[in-house]
Amino acid sequence: MSILVVDDSFDSRLLVRALLKDQGYSDIILAESAAVALEILRSQPTDGHSKVDLILMDLVMPELDGIEACRMFKQDEALQDIPIIMVTASSEVENLERAFAAGAMDFITKPLKRVELLARVRSVLKLKSEMDQRKSREEELRSLTSLDGLTGIANRRCFDEFLEDAWHQALGNHQPLALIMLDIDFFKMYNDAYGHQAGDECLRKVAKTIQSIVNCPFELAARYGGEEFSVILASSDAQYAAQVGEKARIAVVGLNVPHCRSPILPVVTVSVGVASIVPSLQSTAQELIKAADDALYYAKQNGRNQIRIASEVKG
């Protein structure tokens, strides 16, 4: 457990460190101001979890007091989960109310009492540990509910949620939003020829291939349903989406998965439909989906193993 002690008094910092070390807390970081504390916190590993588990912060400090610093930390997404115990010589109810409103979890009064300090630190660290465990479980559950069980890429639910978020962002920024729909050609005939286990393996290989060309956080590859896949491309026009779609089509052919019953090639192929729109208040995400789906249908009707781009979707 790492504890950050923020106090402009040198003696106070040393006292807190001595009391904590005496109880086995070995990782104690000292900061003489809120500004220095912020630098320390922002230099921590950016893996989504800060190294600091608890902040003990003096309320009264020059330049930036503890309450304002607490408010600043809580507004930073990377730091907002770190619990803060306010250390204060003030017993004024107003100050304590302001501290809690700013995001402090607890407070300790000066002069420091060893038993009180250690009891509150243990209590808050225990609560922090429980919160971290719960958050980890929630993230694991969220991951399980957002991934397709067979292919391991995003599922339809995740597709819907990502598209909704991307739509609102594009609407606010007046940026284009593109969608690619891909369908494995003659997949029923593939299953009839090789069996459903081979069909499942084929789906996994195609999904992995499509996923491999999507490596931007503003893009999502998903299994749309059955043998159909989709790729959402934020801030992208139809031309860029067509390049991505063609890259995916060529990559699937390059897998060289045998398909003896395909009338177009002796390997598995995909048909691709592409559409793009600049969202407006008069348009909906369903219009984008329909346009991409119509383009996919056109590709399938005109020979398959090809890409078709929808005419401009009016936003």
Image (cartoon, rainbow, N blue to C red):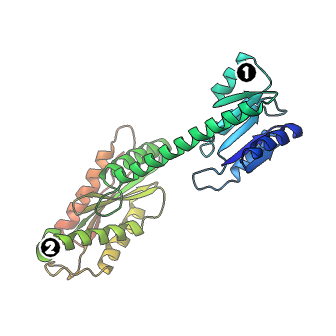
Report the number of discs: 2
Kind of residue at badge 1: Asn
Along the polypeptide, which appears first: circle 2 or circle 1?
Answer: 1
In the rendered image, which quarter is residue 196 located in? bottom left
Asked if one can make out residue 26 in the rendered structure from this viewpoint, the answer is yes
Viewer-closest of 163 and 197: 197
- Residue under label 2, please give it: 195
Task: State the image coordinates of residue 139 (x, y, percent, origin top left).
Answer: 45, 49
- Residue under label 1, please give it: 95
Kind of residue at badge 2: Gly
* Image quarter hosting the C terminus: top left
Q: Is residue 268 above or below residue 279?
A: below
For label 2, the crowd category at 10 Å Cα-Cα, with few meaning under 14, some 14 to 19 and many 20 or more, is: few
Task: State the image coordinates of residue 310 (x, y, percent, origin top left).
Answer: 29, 58
Q: Are marks 2 and 1 in contact (CB under 8 Å)?
A: no
Kindly report the distance in space between the C-alpha atoms of the residues bearing marks 2 and 1: 71 Å
State the residue at coordinates (59%, 51%): 49
